[in-house]
Image (cartoon, rainbow, N blue to C red):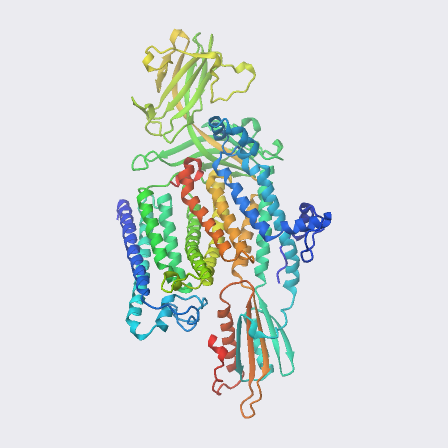
Amino acid sequence: MTPPPPGTTDVASAETEAGGSASTPPTPPSAPPALSPVELSRWAWRQLTSMRTALVLLFLLALAAVPGSVVPQQNIDAAKVLAWQRAHPSLTPVYERLGLFSVYGSPWFSAIYILLMVSLVGCVVPRLRIYWRAARARPPAVPRRLSRLPEFRTFEVEDGPAAALARAEAVLRRRRYRVVVRPAADGGAVSAEKGYLREAGNLLFHLSVLVVLVGFAYGQLFGYKGGVITIVGQDFSNTLSQYDDFAPGRLFSPDDLDPLSFTVDDFRVSWLTSGPEMGQPESFDANITYRTTPDAPARHHDLAVNHPLSAGSTDVFLVGHGYAPVVTVRGGDGKVAYQGPVVFLPEDSSFMSAGVIKVPDAAPQQLAFQGFFLPTYGFTMSRGPFSQFPDALDPVLSLVPYHGNLGLDSGQPQSVYALDTSHLSTYPNADPRLGPSKRVKLSLGQTVALPRGQGSIRFDGVQRWVKLQVSHTPGKEVALAGVLLGILGLMGSLFIRPRRAWVRVSRAPSAPEGPRRTVMELGGLDRSSGGDLAEEVDELERLLKTARTTDGPADVPDVPADPEKEHA
Amino acid sequence: MSTADFAAFSDNAVMFASLVYILAFLSHLTEWVLLRSLPVPEQGALARASVPVGASSGPSELSEGQPGETDARVRAPDTSQEQELRVERFGRIGVALTVVGCALHLAALVTRGLGSDPIRVPWGNMYEFTLAGTFGVSVMYLALMKRHHLRWMGALVTGFLVVVLMLDVLVLYQDAGPLVPALHSYWLAVHVLAAVIASGAFSVGALALVLFLAKDRAERRGTLRPRGYLSRLPEAVALERVAYRLNAFGFPIWTFAALVAGPIWAEYAWGSYWNWDPKEVWAFITWVIYAAYLHARATAGWRGKAASVIALVAFASLLFNFVGINYFFGGGSLHSYAR
């Protein structure tokens, strides 16, 4: 029938590697564990590969996956981890020691699934061997007492034993059984078996779990995932220095980066302007021009959610967008110290965005501004300034100006979204009831001068930025193929019913004046605990009886009902 | 009809579907109440002799597990003939009403999709998932009723549908509207449809398992009351087998929904096929526990009660994933648009 799936030898070698206990043939019937190391390791291996252990490990795996959905995870949302750690200073060291901030890479999580895989291999490999033999074996001989089987029928037919035997063989073959005929004097028997693919499906499913794991692990080790915020109109080239955040696999090397480059040409977004979901984005997309290598011809792609760019082995996804207000800042000396867009990060669905403008070149004092960009300005006494709508209909910058030393020369790296205020001071508010620090409000095109002639800021315009994710995930095709094979195997192992059927044919006790009578006994066995064996045996019985009309005359009335027939 | 008309029609259809399900529930309750006045035949003794109602031809594959009421009809003395007919009538009315409710339910779903501008699949938020999920339960029950003789589940299934639909309307209701951009994909149809079908099968399977555990316990303790509901159910073995088949049917579909369609879509929408998002984690947990159930059921010593408890734990985690993630994790999940 079917050979076991490819990769058998790999798995077999994995068994010896992973098992530790080098010799692991199916051990003889269990004895109490002896103290000798070999015996002990055999006993341990048997325990590990037992179904009970597998069940316990499955439960542990389910249980161990839970904390990762509750505690923020480092490799998923590092910012949220930081926020959580700030909020729970006493729990943080404990959680850190337990690896709760990266559950799915932690030693205990790995231990569970590695043990599970070892257990799986230890369980499947011996079964592969058994299946290899069973799949080529002939259906077993007829049991002496067919009436002991779960389903049993007996009936008489009118042709000779040889014809009846041939018919039984034909019927079973037509029902796609594997058939062995064992003729005997005055009759004989047919053994039949089908549903060999069930165990093949079972084995395929378990092996494909390994395939998925290999594909997944390969992607985790050799792949990378980087995020970059690009202002519309700007270029990106695929080098490490261009990324805002970058998560490489453990075995990733920077040489693996494809020489991809692109320009974000424009960005469009439309919002729902009415209805209960007002303010929800309807769609957004960005046109980009890209080259797979610096010499390659430029091509265009319309990048949108659910419509990524696949360039070679690198994929580019549009994962977010926001506003970058364009400002001109002059220092106390009147010279332009900064001009250009500054990326502000959206804080909520109204796109109220927070950001920092650092102006190290302002003279005589360095300047900085921290505050919010409000795409559609709104104000109430209770809420203060807020954004009414995510689109830039009435954009306003609401900023707190700082002066002093930005601390950029200290050598410590700084985030462009955070301000180190230790050497900076604000301007006092003219009206102290409005708070201690002066805040400036800028509408589009407006200029505000800082107190004491220390400079000015002008709100020139609004640009948009897109957050792009560039990633390379090798092995995903392997993982997909693995899951699909797994489902195929699963369906085989769940829905194919392995069955055995036996037919014994013998001459009826001689009835001298009647036509020649032959007794057929039919027994069935379901090897999978499925429920509908009776249906199949009924059908076989019907076929065995009705096929007779083609072989000979059927004008003889039916035999008297036999007690067993009540089953029908 | 305009878009708004369709949306309003959908809301009405949900209400009427719920009302019809309530009537079906009452009808099945009446069936069971009336049955109490009839003697229960000995289990098994008559199972083969009686022809199950609704099974038009062929021998029953669950021959030992037919509805008690038909057994009663065969054995009961002539005086209760009229009573049997009444029982039978209420049972049939219950099923007929469930079919009507299911049709209204379908109409509610279709018009919900037409009532959104632009037209879309009717499962873009929690209200609609629940609407579609309960429809899955209803269809699964009706589709399998004939083959597996599930009429004894009627009261339980219709009761379940009524409660969940009511909660859906009261707690989760949202006006029909367009989808967020992340859902603009045909994988929405594939991924959610598969999840809904699997959830429907798992739900009916879990209901059958609850009855199995109750009946199994009563059988083992010998506390089966002769006129009780439990004594009218199919034998414990048959209950367990129906539940197993439903779960075995749901499992590959769940695998497809959670581990094929989901990751493929995630790859397109979020740039990574597996993000350890809470919803993904819990779909994986559910998958692992159902896998444990299938293993346990194939293992001597775990079959029956222990395996059934595992399946119910898996169902609990399915429910938690469906509702709990969106409530307790909220915006922390990438699936948070599914409010």
Asked if residue B9 lies left or right of residue A507, the reply is left
Kindly identify the residue that appears in the image at 44 percent across and 64 percent down. B235
**Residue A86's x, y, as percent?**
48, 26
Q: Is residue A323 above or below residue B206?
A: above
Q: Is residue B214 visible?
A: yes
Rendered residue at 44%/24% (across/down): A343
| Quadrant into which the C terminus of chain B falls | top left
Q: In this view of the protein, which residue sits in the foreground, A419 or B27?
A: B27
Residue at (65%, 66%) from the top-left corner?
A137
- Residue A70 at x, y = what percent? 47, 37
- Outermost residue on the bottom side: it is A513
Residue A365 in the image: state x and y as whole percent. 46, 9
Q: Position of residue A44 (x, y in %)?
A: 66, 49
Can residue B121 be seen at all in this image of the molecule? no
Question: Which residue ends up furthest to the front in the rendered image?
Answer: B222
Total number of numbered discs in the rendering = 0
* A401 and A66: which is toward the camera: A66
Asked if residue B102 lies left or right of residue A74, the reply is left
Front-most of residues A562 and B34: B34
Please identify the quarter of the rendering in which residue A286 is found: top left
Rendered position, B43 above or below B21: below
